[in-house]
Amino acid sequence: MSSRRAVVGVMGAGEGASAEAVALAEELGECISTRGWVLLTGGRPAGVMAAASRGALRVEGHLVVGVLPDEGKGDDRQCTAELDLAVFTGMGKARNVINVLSADVVVICGGGGPGTASEAAHQLNAGRPLILLEVLALWRDFFLSLSKGVVSASDVQECCRLIEARLTEA
């Protein structure tokens, strides 16, 4: 029996994140850490990524991992959200595959743009659980139509219950 901590990926908009998505992400990050799970994000100091990290860091025993698009050279090395571990990939948006393959469950928080949509699609291609938290109806309907592995949550507590259920199924 492995003692590896579960890894929960939280994906969503960066600079264009709404205030609602940022608030949800911060609450979600805290909920994830409270349950002893590892938080994994895209690691940048913007939007959902930064907010989820902030929330997780409020909990003693947190572990926050950011998978970043650049090589971490010069000033870029410090351009991260608040993280325990920064993984610099040098892969640009291709790092989205690393994000989802490193997570046991992925939550799309508040929707986002093409990058967030690609993370959701990669998660489904990998046959892994995807939870949609407060996304637009268009996103919800589209991703729900693609796989029975997709579920939708209307608040953070419901989302964390769904994460726990998906982790026990694995």
Image (cartoon, rainbow, N blue to C red):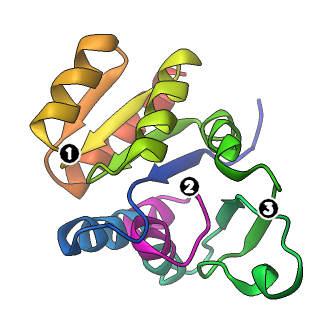
The answer, for residue 127, to whether it is visible in the render is: no
Badge 3 amino acid: Val
Q: Position of residue 7 (x, y in %)?
A: 61, 47
Q: Badge 1: how crowded within 10 Å, few (<14), some, or many (20+)? A: many
Mark 1–mark 2 Cα distance, whole angstroms, equals 23 Å
Mark 3–mark 2 Cα distance, whole angstroms, equals 18 Å
In the rendering, which numbered label is found on residue 87? 3
Q: Badge 2: how crowded within 10 Å, few (<14), some, or many (20+)? A: many
71 or 23, which is in the foreground?
71
Dot 2 falls on a residue whose secondary structure is loop
Residue 39 lies within the magenta run: yes
Q: Which residue is mark 2?
A: 37
Q: Residue at x 38, y 59 (%)?
A: 13
Q: Position of residue 150 (x, y in %)?
A: 32, 23
Displayed quadrant of residue 70: bottom right
Q: Residue at x 28, y 46 (%)?
A: 159
Which quadrant is the C terminus positioned in? top right
10 or 139, which is in the foreground?
139
Dot 3 falls on a residue whose secondary structure is strand
Could you tell whether 53 is left or right of 68 in the image?
left
Which range of residues does the magenta coloring cover?
30-53
Which quadrant is the N terminus positioned in? top right
Identify the mark nearer the N-term, 3 or 1.
3
Of labels 3 and 2, the one closer to you: 3
